[in-house]
Image: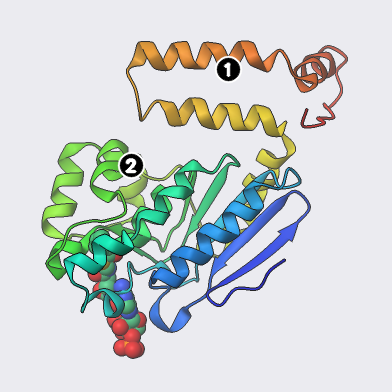
Amino acid sequence: EPTYETLLVERTGRTALVTLNRPRVLNALSLKVMHEVVAATELLDRDPGVGCIVLTGSAKAFAAGADIKEMAPQGPVDMYLTDWFAAWDRLAQLRTPTVAAVAGFALGGGCELAMLCDVLLAADTAVFGQPEIKLGVIPGIGGSQRLTRAVGKAKAMELCLTGRIMDATEAERAGLVSRIVPAADLLDEARAVAETIAGMSLPIAMMAKEAVSRAFETTLAEGVRFERRLFHAAFATADQKEGMTAFIDKRPPKFQHR
Ligand code: CO8
């Protein structure tokens, strides 16, 4: 496993845990963090031995946003030439399912990073928001789009226009997070979810991820057609035969990820 300056990466069986590790600045997302998260997750994504990637921060902060000190002096030409934050989009292209395990602050880029993951688990200490407007900017890693799709216009508008922070309960009710768990159990729960996903057939899990993700990109009719093609393709896998045979034989399936 390569080592990183701003991350810890740990593998257990078929799952990987990527932990943001800049505690002194509440995991502020510098360009270095962006490049390391993208490099680490893309490397894991290419490994068929990895069936699920968990992304987490610390107890106090998943991430308190983009690194304000790094951004403050930037001018538009430099931002444009660097294509500031564009590499974060590559997280949405990962094929391996990802789980965000969020405790504490998930603000600005932190909230956007959590929304780039497939499953979003929140500790009861988690808080979410897009407070960029208070700094004189707007969300820059997809927040205005993904938050709106996740929670609807009313709440997304309010959060983006006022910078108000919502707690885990409100985020769960609004549909931003799949589940709230006690803070002390967050990592165990996230690992358990990851192990469950990683225990499924990898190509089938990828298809499920692709199909759900497509719902954000297209019309209902096109999305249903896309799903049907993948559903049919699933029957080309050995794992479909194994999964259905195991059910009929009343035994657990042994997926080969083929
Ligand atoms: N960037 C850099 N440093 C940060 C950040 C950040 N986002 N957040 C916290 N820190 C640093 C603080 O400066 C402080 O450092 P130091 O000890 O050197 O002063 C340290 O982390 C601890 O922070 P606090 O002392 O503030 O901790 P508190 O517990 O008092 O407060 C808060 C925690 C409420 C989270 C507070 O730190 C805060 O409001 N942080 C900023 C939150 C925010 O506004 N996030 C949005 C950032 S903008 C963004 O994410 C996207 C911008 C899109 C731009 C698009 C460009 C293309």
Q: Position of residue 6 (x, y in %)?
A: 52, 75
The answer to whether the residue bearing label 2 lies less than 8 angstroms from the nearest atom of ligand 1 is no
Q: Nearer the viewer, residue 35 or 133?
A: 35
- Quarter of the image for the C terminus: give it: top right
Q: Is residue 200 left or right of residue 25?
A: right
Q: Position of residue 95 (x, y in %)?
A: 57, 39
Q: Are marks 1 and 2 in contact (CB under 8 Å)?
A: no
Q: Nearer the viewer, residue 89 or 235?
A: 89
Name the quadrant containing residue 129: bottom left
- Quarter of the image for the N terminus: give it: bottom right
- Residue at the location (48% across, 16% down)? 226
Mark positioned earlier in the residue sequence (1 or 2): 2
- Residue at the location (31% across, 42% down)? 146
Q: Nearer the viewer, residue 147 or 206?
A: 206
Q: Is residue 10 left or right of residue 67?
A: right
Q: Nearer the viewer, residue 102 or 206?
A: 206
Q: Residues within 10 Å of mark 2 (few under 14, many from 20)?
A: few
Q: Position of residue 234 (x, y in %)?
A: 67, 17
Residue 173 numbered mark, or none: 2
The residue wearing badge 1 is: 230
Instruction: Tell me the kind of residue under disc 2.
Output: Arg
Q: Quadrant of ligand 1?
A: bottom left
